[in-house]
Each structure stands twice: as C-alpha cells, then as structure tokens.
C-alpha cells in the first residue's frame, strides 16, 4: 500500500485525490493546499488527513510519494523539494513555462534515482495506447505520419488563459508528448501556424492564439501533424492517427453512450463527444495513478518522466519560434 | 450480345430496361406494355423498339430472352408462354399470389432446360452477398441465427396494397428468400405475429398488416428472424445479420454519402438511409441483369430460380397460417 | 451515508461490495457469506466488517440496508427476512426459479413500504437507458417494435448451468425485463423457439437450450423480439433497438477502446466487444447502487421493484410453455 | 443531346467515354487518340465514331463539345485549339505542369465565353460536396480548419511518375483544389514538408517525394491541412474535414459494401476502402459529365473552371518553394 499525498486541491488535484483513495494499492495519506478550505473539502470526501504545508508533507514519514497538482509556477520548486526529500513524484504538466527554469531543474535532479513521473495522462488512454502498441508491434509497418486532432470543448476563462503560458505550452504540450509517444523518435524540425478565430479580441489582448497547426518532421522523414482549437462545440475532440507502410491505426473519439437516433431526414445521430478531460480520460487518469504506484513499488523509472516533460516544452518553444519567424525551426535552435 | 425484351414498362420495368440498355453484354431488343404510352416512353429514352404484344415478343427471332415486369397476375402465364417459346426468362417476384397457381406452373415447366431466373434482387447486393459468402466460407463457423431487418420507407398507395397479396406475399417474400439464401437449408417451422400500427384503419379494411415478425427454424435448429414494417421514416432499413459458432457477419444499412455532422449537443449526424429499392439495390439490379445475361450465354441454371420463388411463397403461406391460428406451423402443412 | 451489508461474496457480491465501498454516499457496513473465507477476502480488500450470519446482519443496528447476492434458492427467504427486519433490499435476480415461490413471497411482502429493488442492472446502462428515454420523450413517435440482441461471450460451467433454472429464467430474464422497460406496457402473448446449437449434448443432458428466440406482443400490437445465444466468440453482444412511427433508437455494442486498424485487405478492424457483464455494465452497476442509495435515503419505491422481478419470471414461464407446446401462449395462462 | 468527343483514350479517357455514352443527355460523338488502336477499342465498346486527329474533331460540325484526356503536355495546346474552334471543353487536370505555360494559356483565352471546365472531379463527390454544402449553409458556423487526408492505394509505375510533374503537381493538386473549394477563400501562405518513405531510392532518383504535408492559411486565418501519401495499403484514403465555430462536417471513407465481420478477438472488421479513383469517385465522374453537359446546354460558366486549375498549380508551386527553402511562402511570391 503506497501512501500518497496530494499537493494542490483544485479541480485536477481533487480528482487525483479521489482516484488515489479508490485505488486498491494506494492510500491517500494526506492532502494540502495553500487554500486550506480546498484541502478540507477533499479531506472530507476522502477521509484523508490535511497537512498544512508542502514542507510538512515532505518531512512526513507517513507519506511514501507525492502528487503535485498545484499552480504551474510552483511545480519545479516542489519537484526539487520532493526529490530532495527522497519522495517519488507524480508532477502535473508542464514542469514550468520557462525552458530555462526546466533546464535548471533538470540539472539539479540529474542522476537522482527517485521516480519522477510527468502527468502526460493521454499516454494511458486505452485507445491512444492501442495505437502506440499497434505501431510498436509493427501492425502498420514502418510509421510514416502521425495525425493528432486535439480540440477543447470550449474556451477556458480569461483568468486561466492569462497564466497558462499560451496555447502551445498549455494545450499543444499534450499533443507534442503524444506525437513523441507515437513516433518513437525525436522531431527535428518544427513548422507551425497560429490564428485567432475563436476569440480574436481576447487572444490579441493576451498575445495568444486559439487555433494552431503544427507540423514536425524527424530525421528519418516521419511527419507529425497536430491540429488544435480552443473550442469544439460538439465536445472534446481527441483523435490520434498513425499511418505507415502497412496500414493505419486510428484512436477515434468517445461518447457517453453508443446510442444512435434515426428519424425523418437523418440517421446515426449520436450524443456529443465526452465533454472534457475528466470524462474523456477517466480510465487514463486511473491507469496513470496505477503506473505511478507501480513505479514507486518497484523503484523503476516511470514510463513517462521528467525529460518527456522537458522535450514537450522544447517543441512548444520551437513552434512559437516558427510562428514568429514564418519558417521551419530546427529543434536544436531552441534547446 | 444477348438481346433482351422487357415486358411491362412500369417503374421497375423501366429501370430494368435502362439497366439492360447500359449493360456491356446485353442489348435492349424491345419493350412492351399494355399501356402503349409507357412502352413508348421507355423506348424513347433507350432507343429500343416497341412491340405491341407479348406474343410478338415471344415469336420474334430478334429476342433472345425476356424480362417479365408486368402486373403480378400475369407473371405465371407469361412465364409459361416464354418457356413454351424457348426464351430464357427473368421474372419479377412473386410468380403468383396463389400457391396453387404457382404449383400448376411448376408442373408445366418441369424438366424444361430454359433458364428461368426469379427477381430476388437482394441476393445480388454486395453487402448481403458478402454475408452469404462469409457464411459459406465458414468465416462465422456453423450458422446459428439469421436476423433480417426489412422496413420500407413509407406505406405504398392503397391501390398498390389492394393487389399486393398482403405484406407477407409482397414484402416479406424478399426476406423469406434472403433467409433461405443465408441459411443454406430449408425452414421447417414458421411462427409469425402481425400488427396494424402504421395505418390501422386501412390495414383493417384491407385485411392486411403493416408490422410483422416471423421466426423460422430449420430441422437442425437454425433460427431465422424477420422484422418488417411498412414505414421507416429514416429511409429503407435493410440489414442482414448472420450469427454462428465462430462469429457474426452484418450487412449494415447504406446512406447516399458518408458525411457526418457534429454540432452543439450531437455528433455523427448522418443523412437518412438510401430512400428505397431503386437507390438501395442499384448495384444489385445491375448484377442481377449481369447474372441473367451470363445464365443465358452459358445455358446454366440461374443462381436464383423458379423453385426459389415457389419456396418463398410457401413460407408466406405458412406465416399467414401461423398468424391466423396462433401456433407454430410446419411448412409441410401448406405445401 | 447509507450503511449497506452485502450477503453473498461470490463474484457478483464481491463486485457489488467494491462498488458500495467506492460510492460517495454509501458505506460497506458488513459482508457475509456461508463460506467465511469468501467474506474475509472481500472484507480484506474493502475494510468492511465480516458478519457470521444473515440473522446477524438483519439484527444489526449498524446496517441500514442489505444487498442480496447469495445463491438464487436463498433469495426469497432472505428477502422476506430483510423486509421483516425493516431493511431495504437490493436483491439480485431472479427472485426465485419457481413462480409459485415468488407468488408466496409477493403475498408476504404485500403492502410493505420497505424499498425493494431488483437487480435488473441493464436498466441503468447509459446506452439502453438513452433508448428508453428517447422512447418516453417521443423521439421515435409511437413505439412499434423492440429488438433485443443478447448473447453471452461463452458458455457458463456445467455446475452453474445445472442450477441456473435454464436459459430463459437465467439469461433471457434480463431481456424480458428490458423489453418491458422499453415497451412501457405488458406483453400479452409470447411465442418462443429454442435450439441446442452451442453445446447440443450438454443441453440435451440438462434439458436446457443455448439458442433462443422469443417474440412477444402487447394488447396494442407492439412487438418485442429477443434473440439469445450462450456463446458469441466476439464478446458480449448487447444491443437494444426501439423502432417507432417517427424513427429508431439503437443502443449499440461497446468495446474497450475506439481504436480501428486498417491494413492490406481490410479496414476498421476493432477490438472485440467488452467481455462480459462486469465490464459491459460497469457504469450500470455503479448507477444501480446509486439508485438504491437514493431509494433508501428518500424512502421512495425503487425504479425497478419486486413486481418487475415477478413479471419477468412470468414471461419466462410463458416462453417455456410456448416452446413446449409450439404455440402462442397468453401470459394469463401462466400467472 | 450534347454531342461530345473524347480526345485521349487511355484509362481515364476510356472511362469518360463510357460515362458520356451512358449519360441520358449526352452522346459520345467521337473518340480520338494518337494511338489509333486505343481509340478503336473505345469505339468498339461504345459505338462511337473514331476521328483521326484533334483537328478533325475541332472542325467537325457533329461535335458540340470536347473532353481532353490526353497526355498532360498536350492539354494547354488542345484547350487553346478547342476554344479557338468554339468548342466547350472539359479538360483533365493539370492544365500544364508549367505555370508559365498556364499563364500564357490564360492570356490567350481571356474573355472567351466558351465554357471551360477543369477535371477536378472530387468537387462532385456526394460526400465531399455535402461537406462543402454544410459549410456554405452555415451548419458549422464560421469555418476555422479544413483537414484533407488523401492517400493513393499504391505507387504508380516509374514511367508515370517520371512525367507526372511530381507529387505536388500531380496528386496534391486535387487537394489544393479541394481546400479552395471548402475554404471559399484563397490561401495566402503555404508551408510544406516532404519525405521519401514509400520508395526512397526511386524518389531520390526522380527528385520527387512520396509523403507530403501542406499547411495553408488564408488572410482571415483559416487553416487548411493536407496530408498525402503515395501508398496506403488499405485502399484509397480520401477524407475531408471542415471544422468551424459551431461544429464539424466530415466526409468519411467509402468501402465496396457495409458488411462487418466479428470473430474471436475482433469486431467490425470491414472490407478495404474502395480501391482507387475510378471506384471511389464513380458517382463524381458521372456528376462531372452531367455538370459539363449542363454548362454546355445553358452556356453558363462551369462550376470549376480554368482559373481553378491555375490557382491549384500556383499552390503547388508555393508548396515546392516552401519545401525547398524551409519557410512559409506567400502565394504572391510564385504567381
């Protein structure tokens, strides 16, 4: 039984806390939040103990591991503290919005054996993972193209967007990781284009974009295409396609039920897609906790680690540079 | 080049005439209809010659074969005349509404080598045929159940229904043939239930039904289930399912395009099903002509023949008896 | 927080116990099994207390409600005892294999206000429920036909089949309930046919069947068709179709992921269907517990109650009589 | 009855000839090919007259219009001659591989009223057209992204590839036109990447590519993404997706039948996609002829004209420049 403490009791922290509480091999040892009431609420529904500070968590002998779900700008600090305390970490993405900060963190934790897992939850989705596994098993031959469609169901509040680091570091970052996960090799060149179509005035104000396409190529010529939008009215559009010399594997969208309606003038009318990440990646969040528990139990490196977090951020930087300069950017330019 | 004459230039005759005219190995030699204007219209669009009577057709040395698409009550007479004239026949279903008449016809044509093909066009549908072929190839192991869904897009006019012979002899007859086609053995016992739900008053007046379910079992215990309705507002619902010891084959519905619409509150919204038999079984009508041409060219028995027409009618009789008497009817009771 | 005790810690009892333990408004108060080790195992993984007898459960003031998941032949006795003790009950189906016993039980509990919920879990399936809701909302107009496909992934062990009461009381019983759930009115006439195709020798020995089709009609002429098989090699085939004057609603099968594979000679190759009821009806089992908790909290009659259990068994009896006598059986004949 | 002559009796010319012969409002007046035997073969199967030269066709008073399906390097010359002769033209794409030659042709035909239709057949596909129509009808709100997947079933012979002008002018050209058709506005900026993955040695030799991704943006920020491959082993992969502020429209792939196979370990196994353009765009080729006939009859400009052919080639040039220079290319740079 691995005893895990959750730092940060916002929406995603609360969800992780519930998942840990329900996990057969894990126990929710403690919860903590700078907003004490948020921690109390999660404690009340899970029976977990509230701790008053991250320091208390890191020094507690009742805590075997920590999950960091705090504000992004605290991730790197907490991660370093956790590692210093010898506590395995599952850290929500991104590590930090600044690549420089991530690189400093990387230097600090270099050589450390403590398991550090990054919260790229989509790697644990049964559908996307089935695509990955089909590629690795050679079911589609040699991989040629990866096509990732990733559209949020609706624009996040301005307050969130303001601190998000922008669509590429906040949203596309998941797709950069998915591309790397499926490709099995590193993108070398990045081209991107970005538009303001969903909320032009707001995006202008924030210096951000809401509609993005990124194309990446590897040294061997494999291509990865990502299309993003901040608002898909039909639900959370999450598709992964791998095309290769012998075929194709597609992870299609999911709906809350498989019910189809037929009537005058139409057929196959279905429910909208599952609303957002909590619904869409429910099994994946469970499996993510399971993988972390296993990594802690076995002291093995997690399947998705610190460097995966760093590399996804590097690709975001390259894409931003490509948008700014209107040219293909070699990844090494931004590392 | 097989020279074919079409007797009967109503909707289905006109369609057959156009298909024959367009077929690479057939020529539309002549058309005939008791309504001369109907024949003239078809002749005008196809370039075919008009003949004034069936007798003229049967005696013409320019006609190699005939297609009978006249009113049902003339089918048996014309079929006998065609055979007497040594002309291969493609006869629309049903042979006749009276099993006694069909049996007399059977006696008359017994032993004749002239190819006689029955118009059970659905056997030529690429999808249904793929189910048949999968069953014969053993892809689903030993067949256990056949489930046929067959619903018309809308009620035919009263004038048509009045002379149709009733839903079982007019509409279900195609499904009886499909069941036999997939089963590969003869149904022995028939149970049926029939309701008046689409147009209760009209059906009451006609002594007919609009909603029917038939269950048949073979000696080996295979089951065939047919569900019919005279009115499906979403289009022509035509599905065939074969279930067996090793799997299942499904021939699903078809739509005019594969376009899906997604919007607020829904996904996968598609066009209605193809409207009716002319649209749904277009390829099948083509293939039916092709099979007839081949049978004529090679003097081989057609893949669907007179006895298939008779057996489907026997099953309709058994189903009617089951409905009337509220019991399972053995097919031998009505033969 | 409703404190629920689980009687019977076999496969389904253990699953219910885990679901109760994870439910936010319920607590797993106790578990009990005549095989103490089974109870201990469930207790170990859930933290629940083991009680040594049903009597102890019924007399405990720490137990607000009970879930009966014991052997079928104890259901009616335990249900009566629970009601006598004033404990709300969620009872697994069937109430008993004997309609006479069920009727005695009905007489005993008549007028009792204690919530009694029957374990017809499929009513809580998001897909089937969406069909039900579409029908009730008038989305398909007036209902004409209900078509239920229900095939187990594989034959149960002989030991289970021997005490199952036969396919109609054990397996079809769920479909009888689903038919009533969708129909919204009572079947009046039942016709059925049954075959031995999956395991002929075993079925002969047991006097049972493995392949069944049932057709039921209501007074208003609505038709319900059920097709069953004990073995579908591609997974647990669970479909519900409602057809009406304005359209159709289909609850389609579910798979563990939405991944499709394309390769030389094929497209859209997907994973097999979800294996069996534990996987297929996972959300439904959760929702079933939720509905029970709510019924207990509010002292309202559960959405599926004792009489639903009795009526499903009556339909099974009518179907058995129809199979034996080869005729349409009126439900009143067997009540 | 429009009398059409077909110039060029290769695979695509022969297909067009047959379609014209079968069209109710058109007549195949003549066929011509520099290889007389090819013309004779088409004449034999269609009954058309053979003409010995393009000049004979253009001067014949029995020819109302011409279809140019000759080798690409003759298109522009023949088109100019047809226009000079006052014969409406349906010209296969591309007009020419050289933009300079196309521009000269444009200058020559400027102001001419003779209907000139370009062979961008995909605009007539029922599925792609339904996407276009949904976009124009506002069904998906304001368009944001167009995603076109276009993969050939297999590599063409080296002899064909050598004269094809390269993948962008030969294959992607259809997708450039489709993007413009759906976008409803002109791409302004083009970014592309190209790889040699299907047949690296051959592509190297030819200076060509087999795997291409193109991203285009319009002035308003709309994005169009094209992914191409010369070899998809599962068939001709042809999908068009339009995403907008209110939803999405998808034109999905097509298969020869709707039959699905289920077995141990899999479900929904379907036939491969329709093989190639002749099968996939059969209805579209018919509709293309129909649109041309209508344009000739009504003397209206065709729905897809000369300038559409020119603009698609301009986009190909821009994409080639982007690949060569590794940067976003503004379309005006290459015009």
Image: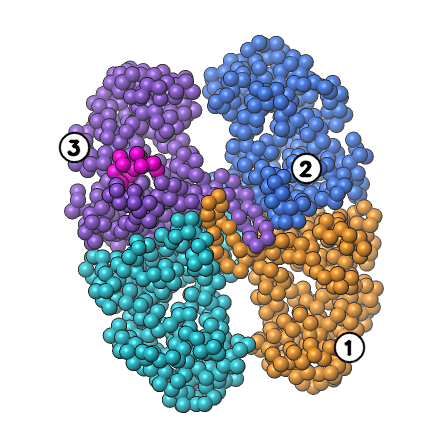
Chain colours: A cyan, B blue, C orange, D purple
- Which range is magenta? D156-170
Secondary structure at numbered mark 1: helix
Distance between mark 1 and mark 3 Cα atoms: 96 Å
Mark number, residue B184: 2
Residue B322 appears in view: no
Kindly indicate whether the residue at mark 3 contacts the one at mark 2 (C-beta within 8 angstroms): no
Both on one chain, marks 1 and 2? no
Q: Is residue B5 magenta?
A: no
Q: Where is residue D170 in the image (x, y as percent from the top left)?
A: 29, 39
Give the number of marks. Answer: 3
Q: Which mark is residue B181?
A: none
Say if residue D34 shows up in the picture.
Answer: yes
Up the image or down, B163 lies above or below A219; here it is above
Res. C137 image quadrant: bottom right
Answer left or right for B191 relative to A119.
right
Q: Do labels 2 and 3 share a chain?
A: no
Q: Where is residue D89 in the image (x, y as percent from the top left)?
A: 28, 27
Q: What chain letter is assigned to the residue under label 1? A: C
Q: In this view, does A251 lie to the left or right of A109?
A: right
Circle 1 is placed at which residue position?
C81
The quadrant of the image that shows the C terminus of chain D is top left
Residue C279 position (above or below residue A73): above
């Amino acid at each position: 039984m691995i005893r895990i403490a959750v730092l940060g009791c916002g929406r995603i922290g609360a969800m992780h806390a519930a998942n840990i509480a329900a996990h057969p091999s894990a126990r929710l040892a403690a919860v903590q939040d700078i907003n004490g009431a948020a921690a109390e609420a999660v404690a009340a529904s899970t029976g977990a103990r509230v701790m008053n500070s991250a320091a208390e968590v890191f020094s507690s002998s009742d805590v075997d591991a920590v999950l960091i779900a705090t504000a992004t700008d605290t991730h790197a600090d907490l991660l370093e503290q956790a590692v210093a305390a010898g506590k395995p970490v599952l850290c929500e993405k991104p590590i930090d919005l600044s690549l420089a900060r991530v690189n400093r963190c990387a230097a600090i934790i270099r050589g450390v054996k403590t398991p550090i897992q990054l919260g790229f939850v989509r790697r644990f989705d049964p559908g996307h993972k089935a695509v990955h596994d089909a590629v690795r098993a050679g079911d589609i031959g040699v991989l040629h193209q990866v096509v990732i469609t990733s559209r949020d169901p609706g624009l996040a509040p301005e307050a969130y967007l303001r601190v998000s680091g922008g669509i590429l570091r906040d949203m596309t970052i998941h797709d950069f990781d998915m591309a790397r996960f499926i490709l099995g090799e590193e993108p070398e060149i990045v081209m991107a284009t970005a538009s303001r179509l969903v909320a032009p005035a707001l995006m202008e104000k924030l210096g951000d974009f809401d509609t993005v396409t990124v194309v990446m190529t590897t040294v061997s010529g494999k291509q990865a295409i990502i299309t993003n939008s901040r608002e898909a009215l039909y639900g959370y559009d999450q598709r992964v396609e791998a095309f290769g010399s012998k075929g194709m594997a597609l992870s299609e969208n999911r709906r809350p039920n498989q019910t189809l309606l037929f009537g005058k003038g139409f057929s196959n009318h279905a429910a909208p897609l599952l609303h957002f990440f909590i619904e869409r990646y429910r099994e994946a969040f469970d499996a993510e906790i399971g993988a972390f528990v296993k990594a802690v139990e076995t002291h093995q490196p997690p399947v998705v680690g610190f460097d995966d977090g760093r590399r996804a951020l590097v690709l975001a930087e390259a894409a931003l540079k490509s948008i700014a300069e209107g040219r293909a950017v070699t990844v090494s330019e931004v590392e």
